[in-house]
Image (tube, helix red, strand yellow):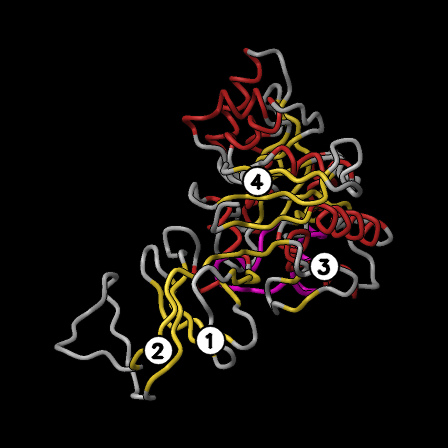
């Protein structure tokens, strides 16, 4: 077995996806699972479809191409505004894209017309987190500029929150999105199929909301894979929070001083740590570093403390029994660690409990480095 490795429990991901799809359906909200954190891996994609997903979403056309070429047949949504340089691929591989620029939609229209196909667009609305989105006061005029473009189907509107500044969804913001949907339909005489109310951070709002709303879709990644809500980082009742873990191997274990000696400057990353002399400590080095994972997103076992890291070394201090060379240490991860580990070519990805005929059962053990 090769290390470091990312342990991916397919049965737990299947459970999380199915649970969220069925639970949110009771609130008349559909779930579009987001596969960007796993690079559109076909195993994950098939698990999500088996769990009930009728559409998948990703921020990279390359990931969507990968899923399509591997036989993932459900419609696919591009959740980042298309680059002009990739319009042909977007039209060829994506059924729907999220958009904020008239120029981009005009190009989508021209390419879709040449290809004799239709392309769906969801117009993203800015609700305060200041990432992508048309300002609310501009949405009607924006629609007016694209409503007659050939081969373009306006599927709906959507919003994104929490990703840049952590601005949380609330009744006021979701009411504004609903009112905009009503206004667009009234002005243009069209029916909007999708009102996408955000990502995993919107789950608690949907579950708690009792009033009328047009919001009928969420784009979920973190909640499915890690079982938590991004804003509060609280686990979601009924979901597994350990579907993804990371295992690394100890390559050095020694008792060392806690305080370095000699003239100090910045480390390899320009950082300067303030240290205290705590005497001799039990220190272990793992074959894992910043080139493999976002170390800040790792959560060590309760009796271990991550002291520091370099590009390929992780230094742990243990408070209980000292580690020995060859010991394997398992970490849980937050979203930043999962995303970076999945993207790392040096991280071995191991899929547990996967069966291609029914991803919720079986004990097939697969290993992948991509």
Q: Residue at x 36, y 73 (%)?
A: 254
Distance, label 1 to label 3, CA atoms, is 30 Å
Give coordinates of residue 339: x percent, y percent.
51, 50
Name the residue at 51% across, 80% down. 320
Q: Which residue is mark 4?
A: 79
Residue at image mark 3: 240
Task: State yes or no: discs 1 and 4 in contact (Cβ < 8 Å).
Answer: no
Which residue occupies the extreme right position in the image? Answer: 26
Q: How many marks?
A: 4
Report how far apart the C-alphas of labels 3 and 2 lie in the structure: 37 Å
Mark number displayed over residue 238: none
Q: Residues within 10 Å of mark 4 (few under 14, many from 20)?
A: many
Classify mark 2: helix, strand or loop.
strand
Q: Report the Cα–Cα distance between label 4 and label 2.
A: 49 Å
Q: Nearer the viewer, residue 164 or 310?
A: 310
Residue 164 on the magenta segment: yes
Give the x, y percent position of residue 345.
Answer: 43, 41
Task: Tell me if mark 3 has few (under 14), some (14-19) or many (20+) residues whose alpha carbon lies within 10 angstroms of its own.
Answer: many
Q: Is residue 131 left or right of residue 355?
A: left
Q: Are marks 1 and 2 in contact (CB under 8 Å)?
A: yes
Picture quadrant where residue 223 is located = bottom right
Kindly report which numbered mark, 3 or 2, lies closer to the viewer in this rendering: 2
Question: Marks 1 and 2, how far apart in space?
Answer: 9 Å
Give residue 255's mark.
Answer: 2
Task: Give residue 74's position: percent from left, percent from top.
Answer: 71, 29
Q: Nearer the viewer, mark 1 or mark 4?
A: 1
Q: Which residues are magenta?
A: 159-180
Closer to the camera: disc 4 or disc 2? 2
Please tell me how crowded label 1 is: few (under 14), some (14-19), or many (20+) other residues with Cα within 10 Å. Answer: some
Task: Tell me the element at label 4.
Answer: loop
């Amino acid at each position: 077995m090769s290390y470091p490795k990312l342990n991916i429990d397919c049965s737990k991901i299947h459970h999380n996806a199915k649970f969220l799809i069925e639970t949110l359906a009771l609130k008349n909200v559909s779930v579009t699972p987001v596969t960007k954190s796993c690079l559109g891996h076909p195993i994950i994609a098939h698990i999500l479809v088996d769990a009930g997903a009728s559409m998948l979403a990703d921020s990279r056309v390359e990931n969507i191409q990968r899923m399509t070429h591997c036989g993932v047949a459900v419609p696919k949504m591009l959740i980042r505004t298309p680059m002009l340089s990739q319009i042909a691929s977007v039209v060829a591989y994506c059924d729907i894209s999220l958009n904020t620029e008239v120029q981009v939609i005009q190009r989508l229209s021209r390419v879709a017309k040449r290809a004799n196909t239709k392309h769906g667009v969801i117009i993203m609305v800015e609700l305060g987190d200041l990432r992508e989105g048309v300002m609310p006061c501009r949405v009607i005029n924006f629609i007016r500029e694209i409503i007659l473009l050939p081969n373009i189907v306006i599927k709906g509107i959507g919003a994104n929150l929490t990703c840049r500044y952590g601005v949380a969804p609330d009744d006021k913001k979701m009411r504004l999105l609903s009112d905009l949907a009503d206004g667009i339909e009234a002005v243009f005489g069209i029916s909007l199929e999708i009102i996408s109310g955000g990502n995993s951070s919107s789950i608690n709002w949907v579950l708690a909301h009792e009033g009328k709303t047009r919001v009928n879709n969420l784009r979920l990644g973190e909640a499915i894979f890690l079982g938590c809500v991004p804003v509060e980082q609280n686990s979601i009742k009924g979901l597994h929070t350990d579907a993804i873990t990371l295992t690394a191997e100890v390559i050095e274990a020694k008792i060392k001083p806690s305080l370095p000696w000699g003239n100090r400057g910045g480390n390899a990353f320009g950082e300067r740590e303030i240290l205290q002399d705590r005497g001799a400590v039990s220190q272990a080095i793992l074959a894992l570093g910043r080139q493999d994972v976002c170390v800040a997103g790792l959560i060590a076992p309760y009796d271990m403390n991550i002291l520091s890291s370099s590009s390929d070394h992780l230094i742990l201090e243990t408070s209980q029994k000292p580690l020995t060379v060859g010991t394997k240490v398992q970490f849980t991860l937050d979203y930043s660690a999962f995303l970076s580990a999945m993207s790392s070519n040096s991280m071995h990805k191991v899929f547990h409990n996967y069966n291609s005929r029914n991803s919720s059962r079986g004990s097939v053990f697969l290993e992948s480095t991509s």
